[in-house]
Image: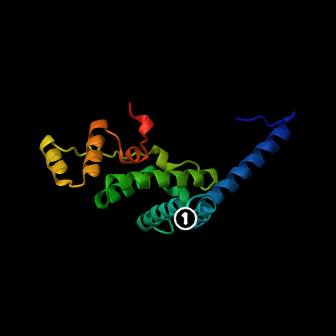
Amino acid sequence: SRSTGARTKPDALRFLRASNEDGDARRRAQQSITLDEFKTSYQQYCRSIHTAKTVESSEMALRVLVRCLGTSKVMHTILPIDCERFLAARAEKSSPLTVLRLYRTLAAAFERARSWGHMPSNPWRSVKRPRVPEILPAFFTHEEYKVLLAAIEDRDFRELALFAVMTGMRQGELIAARWDWID
């Protein structure tokens, strides 16, 4: 709700009619843009503010969505069930991580469409975020570690591998290590 700022009833009614006309104009504007038209304008927007990799990711996600929903699909008619069906179809063909990336990219794109006035709400915000199963890291057994050390002929490299295992340091930490770090 908001104040009309009017002191008389006729002024308030004029304000109400003008507000309704503005709302009708916004709804007509929402109805006029298709998914394909949005894709084109969003890609131009992305190129102006995002890195090349982000632009490529958003272009791919929108291209796949357009292929699934159709070029003539009007933006404000896209519902959460359309988004869920799209994710389910992609989950059959892609990894869970790819599906999660598609979800994030499309949710952000549709949030921009909402802020531009192409749709009243973002349907992706009603869709449950896809889960990615946790992948446990691979570990050497004690025997495999002994075989690895025995296979390394270079003494310095063998000591580096031993140092890495004993400290749990990662490759970048090992490379950046300095003598004053050692007690």
Q: Identify the colour scheme used.
A: rainbow
Quadrant (top left, top right, bottom left, bottom right) of the N terminus: top right
Residue 24 placement (x, y as % from top left): 68, 53
Q: Residue at x 46, y 65 (%)?
A: 60
Q: Quadrant of residue 8?
A: top right
> Which residue reaches farthest right?
7
Which residue is tagged 1?
Answer: 39
> Which residue reaches farthest top?
183
Quadrant (top left, top right, bottom left, bottom right) of the C terminus: top left
Residue 59 placement (x, y as % from top left): 50, 64
User: Going by the image, does 42 lie left or right of 66?
Assistant: right
Q: Residue at x 17, y 45 (%)?
A: 145
Q: Residues within 10 Å of mark 1 (few under 14, many from 20)?
A: many
70 shown above or below 172: below
Residue 52 placement (x, y as % from top left): 54, 63
- Residue 159 seen in render: yes
The amino acid on which the numbered mark 1 sits, given as a three-letter code, is Lys
Q: Quadrant of residue 5?
A: top right
User: Going by the image, does 142 lie left or right of 8?
Assistant: left
> Which residue reaches farthest left?
143
Q: Residue at x 62, y 61 (%)?
A: 45
**Element at label 1:** helix
- Which of the two residues, 182 or 3, is positioned nearer the viewer here? 182
- Which of the two residues, 76 or 54, is positioned nearer the viewer here? 54
- Which of the two residues, 167 or 178, is positioned nearer the viewer here? 178
